[in-house]
Amino acid sequence: MYESVLVASRGEIASRIIHTVRALGLKAIAVYSEADADLPFVAEADEAILLGPAEPALSYLDVPRILEAARRTNARAIHPGCGSLAGNAAFARRVEDAGLGWVGPPPLAIARMSDRINARNLMKEAGVPVAPGVWEPVPDPGTAVQEAERIGYPVMVKAAAGAGGAMAAARDEAALRKAFETVRAAAGRSPSGGSGGGPDILLERFVERARHVGVQILGLADGTVLALGERDRSMRHGHRTMAEETPSPGVTPALRERMAAAAVRAGEAVGHRGAGTVECLVDPAAQDFFVLGMSTRLQAGHPITELVTGIDLVEQQLRIAAGEPPSFTEVAPRGHAVGLRVHAEDPVRFRPAPGEIKVWEEPVGEGIRIDAGYAEGNTVTSHYDPLLAKLCVRGETRDDTLARARAAVGAFRIEGALKTDLPFLAGLLGHPEFAAGTYDTGTVDRMRAPS
């Protein structure tokens, strides 16, 4: 095992990784920007190195500064967290070229899945179900119209490079032409958008009232790929997950078994090692699914998988990277878990509302886990994602879990010169579709629609 690990991330995920690194008796090294000097993760590390100013390009995304911090602290490995560096094959290669351990999948596996068109073709060759769509980049709106008529409306227009919000649904030709230009322009503005001098576009069939379900996989050091259950992330606004749960109330045992088998095939086809999530689009009416791709990193929603399996995923990542076997012998999920993302934002408009935190009182009790990035006295700035904490709750049944979650949200006090989305999360837990488990990827938008 590595003697010391530099955590190239910030906030709650840095705290979460540092906790496991220290629990294993290893030295945890944090890096931070000037804006984050007072955050808990800096104090929790054994050593912390200032990278630079608040701007991400001059601190958390500055690869030479991160590698220099690793050299100065004599770090033996780098854990990239769950942000953009974790999915950056070039960064992974730089870490390995520097003689450091890379706590993540092989750079080739990351590269294979970073382009959605390449990933679709690879999954198809491996016998993994993928959505009807194109197998090569769509060069122009006219070609897109021809392909959409072949696939059948509605279709989803996506940036091939997986550029964040660069996607849109289209239900007819006029909407398709507009969506094509919008997505291409958005992909071109993204640092990860496009390849070969311009953003590539793909089309897939769009499924109405679908569920977005990710299957957690773990690629072991010996090449074995395991499936550790799913997380239903359908409660989302745009591309941001608001709440997630495991197991999914919209997946039958038979469908769960098929999805797990497909996820393992996908991981084996890519040569995946470490933690990853195979993203699926589920048609509840047909009880069928398509694989959308693979997130080759530790995902923000991983705590609820840990709650029901009892497996520390960060510990397994470190063991796999070091060439060691896992610390568990079987995967036996038990109970139910829900995760809620608490953001510093207006609970109605979903716009960031940062500021100083004057009161921070976390709920406590059986089955409650809080992964927090802030504490009382900290100031949330506008430089980064406004995620404050993940409130995760486990119970023996779904009803027990939801009851505990409602009580926990009501007991979570965050006050000061900021706003939080706790009022929205309370409404979400009480919404009839969520309470009944019949929600889909459009539920949050329907909750926010004018009555």
Image (tube, rainbow, N blue to C red):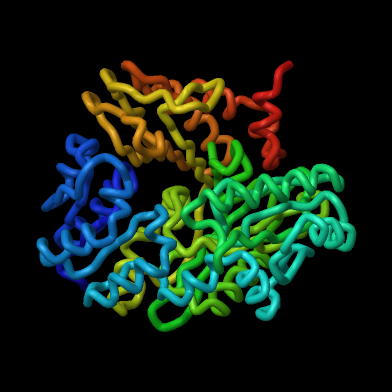
Seen in the picture, residue 423 relative to 119 is either above or below; the reply is above
Please name whichever residue, 69 or 12, is drawn nearer the observer in this view of the structure.
Answer: 69
Q: Give how far across and how far down residue 423 sits, in percent.
A: 50, 21
Quadrant for the N terminus, please. Answer: bottom left
Residue positioned most to the front: 197
Please name whichever residue, 222 or 251, is drawn nearer the observer in this view of the structure.
Answer: 222
413 with respect to 76 (left or right): right
Residue 216 shows in the view: yes
Seen in the picture, residue 429 relative to 235 is either above or below; the reply is above
Q: Give how far across and how far down residue 40 sits, in percent.
A: 21, 38
Quadrant for the C terminus, please. Answer: top right
Residue positioned most to the bottom: 222
Q: Give how far across and how far down residue 182 sits, in percent.
A: 67, 45
Residue 289 shows in the view: no
Quadrant of the rendered image containing residue 196 = bottom right
Seen in the picture, residue 259 relative to 61 is either above or below; the reply is below
171 with respect to 157 (left or right): right
Q: Which residue sits at x=66%, y=63%?
A: 291
Q: Give how far across and how far down residue 5 sits, in percent.
A: 21, 63
Please name whichever residue, 355 or 193, is drawn nearer the observer in this view of the structure.
Answer: 193
How many marks on residues? 0
Q: Which residue sits at x=70%, y=23%?
A: 449
446 with respect to 347 (left or right): right
Seen in the picture, residue 35 relative to 129 is either above or below; the reply is above
Q: Which residue sits at x=41%, y=71%?
A: 105
Q: Which residue sits at x=79%, y=48%?
A: 176
